[in-house]
């Protein structure tokens, strides 16, 4: 056998992973749209907590009325960072509502336990209220024709450990989709229904009473942010049931891929709560996950949601 006939010593055996798998490598981490006017803040301090999502705001007392200039700067920060954190505010329900009203009309949610008023939702499993957990990646109330624009959440009691909340940037999630997936979902429409997210907590008789009030709705799989123009994934595991116009198997396959995007740590921020802390997030641009790792310890939170517009 000549030298040229010698078998290669570094031949690799055939190997592949499923086409739908997640891949390691560099992520596209773009915090703002192209040509965004990225300028300093003058009325408060801002400390980033993630690459594209999450920032702590310092030097603002949310119990005081917002001036137009401060409201404008906070809105710009919300659009840039998607979720804002305010430490140690200890707001009354009235002050929490007043802060949220700077962004529009408040939303009520009869599916969840009521706080001090109809537009305050209270989460307190230890008190025998609605036993929701929210430890699944989701966007709030996408089963509505006009899902919430945003939400203001305050922790009134925190457990000795655990109980963090995570948020995921769905613009980054979209930016990092494989090209073939983008080609399949750009322009697609999906159905959203309240039943998958709530049938774990209520019996069929109670759910049936709500079906007329909350029929299935449709939203674009990829929505456009009305203020920034960013393209963002707008499907979630709690409420998105199928992509219309394709076979069920293909819909399920695509949704599995899209749901996975929220699980990528580079697109996330994680917040460890202290009593009186506030998180204000853009519900149009994010998903979130409340970590239920605190056993039987008490965790009490109250949320106020700002009504939104119809996604396009």
Image (spheres, rainbow, N blue to C red):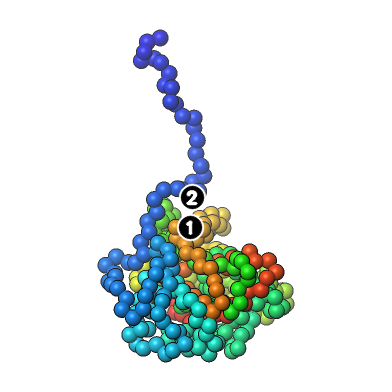
Q: Which residue is mark 1?
A: 265
Residue that numbered label 2 is attached to: 22
Q: Give above or below for 180 relative to 226.
A: above
Identify the residue at the far top of this view.
1
Side of 122 where 263 appears, left or right: left
> Which of the pair 116/89 is nearer the observer?
89
Residue 204 versus residue 183 in the image, above or below: below
Q: Quadrant of residue 267?
A: bottom left
Quarter of the view holding residue 202: bottom right
Q: Residues within 10 Å of mark 1 (few under 14, many from 20)?
A: few
Reading the chain from its start, which is encountered first: label 1 or label 2? 2
Question: Looking at this view, is 279 or 267 the one in front?
Answer: 279
* 311 and 33: which is toward the camera: 33
Q: Tell me what residue is drawn at x 56 percent, y 77 percent.
A: 275
- Please identify the quadrant where the N terminus is shown: top left
Residue drawn at x 36%, y 68% is 230
């Amino acid at each position: 056998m000549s030298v040229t006939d010698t078998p290669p010593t570094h031949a690799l055996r055939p190997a592949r992973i499923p086409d739908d798998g997640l891949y390691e490598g560099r992520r596209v981490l773009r915090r703002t749209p192209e040509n965004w006017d990225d300028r300093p803040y003058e009325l408060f301090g801002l400390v980033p907590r993630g690459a594209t999502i999450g920032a702590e705001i310092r030097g603002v007392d949310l119990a005081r009325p917002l001036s137009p200039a401060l409201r404008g700067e906070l809105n710009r920060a919300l659009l840039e960072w998607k979720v804002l954190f305010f430490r140690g505010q200890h707001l009354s329900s009235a002050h929490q509502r007043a802060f949220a009203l700077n962004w529009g009309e408040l939303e009520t949610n009869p599916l969840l336990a009521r706080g001090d008023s109809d537009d305050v939702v209270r989460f307190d499993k230890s008190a025998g209220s609605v036993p929701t957990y929210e430890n699944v990646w989701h966007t709030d109330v996408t089963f509505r024709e006009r899902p919430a624009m945003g939400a203001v959440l305050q922790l009134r009691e925190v457990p000795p450990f655990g109980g963090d909340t995570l948020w995921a940037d769905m613009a980054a999630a979209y930016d990092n989709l494989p090209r073939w997936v983008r080609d399949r979902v750009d322009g697609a429409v999906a159905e959203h229904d309240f039943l998958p997210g709530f049938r774990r907590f209520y019996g069929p008789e109670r759910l049936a009473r709500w079906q007329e009030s909350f029929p299935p709705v449709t939203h674009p799989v990829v929505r456009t942010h009305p203020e920034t123009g960013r393209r963002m994934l707008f499907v979630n595991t709690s409420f998105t049931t199928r992509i219309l116009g394709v076979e069920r198997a293909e819909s399920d396959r695509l949704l599995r891929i899209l749901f996975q995007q929220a699980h990528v740590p580079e697109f996330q921020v994680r917040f460890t709560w202290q009593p009186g802390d506030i998180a204000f997030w853009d519900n149009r641009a994010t998903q979130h996950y409340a970590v239920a790792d605190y056993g039987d310890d008490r965790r009490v939170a109250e949320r106020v949601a700002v009504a939104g517009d119809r996604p396009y």
